[in-house]
Amino acid sequence: MKNIYLLLIVYLITQTAYSQTTEQRYFSKSLSVNVNTPAELTDDNGQSLNINNIYRVHLVTRNTGTDTGAEYLVWYNDNSSIWRYRAVNISGDTSNHPILFIDNNVVKIKTNHPNLYTIKAFVEELNTQEADVWPNIFGSSYQWQREKNSLFYKDGNVGIGNSNPSRALVINGSAADNLVLKRNGGTDANNTIKFENENVNMYVGASTSNDFAIGFHPNLNSNAKFIISSNTGNVGIGTTNPDIWKLAVNGEIRAKEIKVETGWSDFVFENTYQLPSLKEVENHIQQKGHLKDIPSAKEVEENGIFLGEMDAKLLQKIEELTLYTIAQEKKILSLEKQNSTIQNLEKEIEILKEENKEIKQLNKKLIELQNKLDRLIQVK
């Protein structure tokens, strides 16, 4: 019997030494709580948590049919004189899931369920003897948080292949593919990156047809604003089907300059070119309602135009008009020359008329003199 008591004393001393070392202690306790009846988390002696210590708290709800569990870090912020906590790993925060929170600067445990449940708390306590020690001494679990199946980073920047990241995520690598994003399965098999702000969510990635697309809806296959076809490399803006065009734009385009490389219409000035007569041009306009070689309004509405080809056709008409103008200028010059000749002839005629008039007057005087002479001869 004495040996049994001795063994019991040795066991208790061993357990006390194991669970209550100076720097680190482990203890557990059970708390009966619900949504309206939270309970304070105290140390193994039932006292309020020590402000000089840091606590890692694992919580499990007992006797429930659902998966529960949570891990929290709890510490006292000496600068603000308040208790702080962080959820490191939680299975949820509704129903009978265990929840740690701060109420009136007191660390408490509860659930969101109206029924009372027993919460088992497993606590690791670090006695740092300093109230301003940050809880990241527990390691990366202080920054990396897990909620159900989601893993996220709470503080600072993340570097992959980079030990001093200057942005939220910095990736350095020597391989050609430093970052690979892949989506498996699903009927809407878009593989996208989402850029989110308060009003508009923009998506960049692959559409269901494996085209590269940019748009404002996760289903890029039907809502893309910009798309590059994976089959042809053709680009569509405002359309998801660039078809045979290297660049297809459904909308207006504004530019400082556009260079079009196409054929030109200087053949009009060649000697072999048959320039239509103005009568032929007039007849075509009367019959067709548009210039020859120029599409009608209906054709343009149905098929559009090729900018380079249309510029060449318009230039052809301008060059034809130039030839018409040159021909008309020659005729005008010829007529002006003829008119000048006529005017000179008219002046000469006027001079001749004057001269003829003078001759008539002289002739009249000669006749009068002859008559006088004849009378004188008769008198003698």
Image: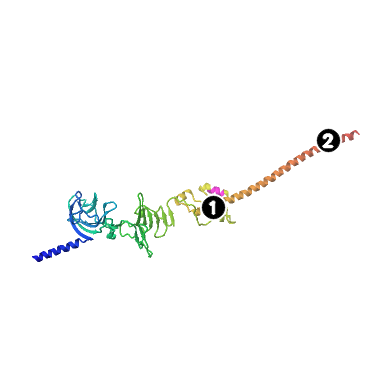
Residue named by callout 2? 368
At x 15%, y 64%, the residue is 11
Magenta residues? 279-284
- In this view of the protein, can residue 361 be seen by the observer? yes
Amino acid beneath label 1: Leu
Q: Is mark 2 on a helix, strand or loop?
A: helix
Q: Quadrant of the C terminus?
A: top right
Of the numbered discs 1 and 2, the one sitting upstream in the chain is 1
Name, please, the residue furthest toward the left.
1
The circle on residue 315 is 1
Residue 229 horizontal/vertical position (percent):
40, 58
317 over 8 or under it: above or below: above
- Res. 180 in view: no
Q: How many residues crowd mark 2 within 10 Å: few (<14), some (14–19), many (20+)?
A: few
324 left or right of 94?
right
Camera-side residue of 96 and 308: 96
- The residue lying at 61 percent from left, 50 percent from top is 327
Q: Where is residue 275 in the image (x, y as percent from the top left)?
A: 57, 53
Principal secondary structure, stretch drawn in magenta: helix
Residue 134 at what x, y percent from top left? 29, 57
Residue 29 falls left or right of residue 305 = left
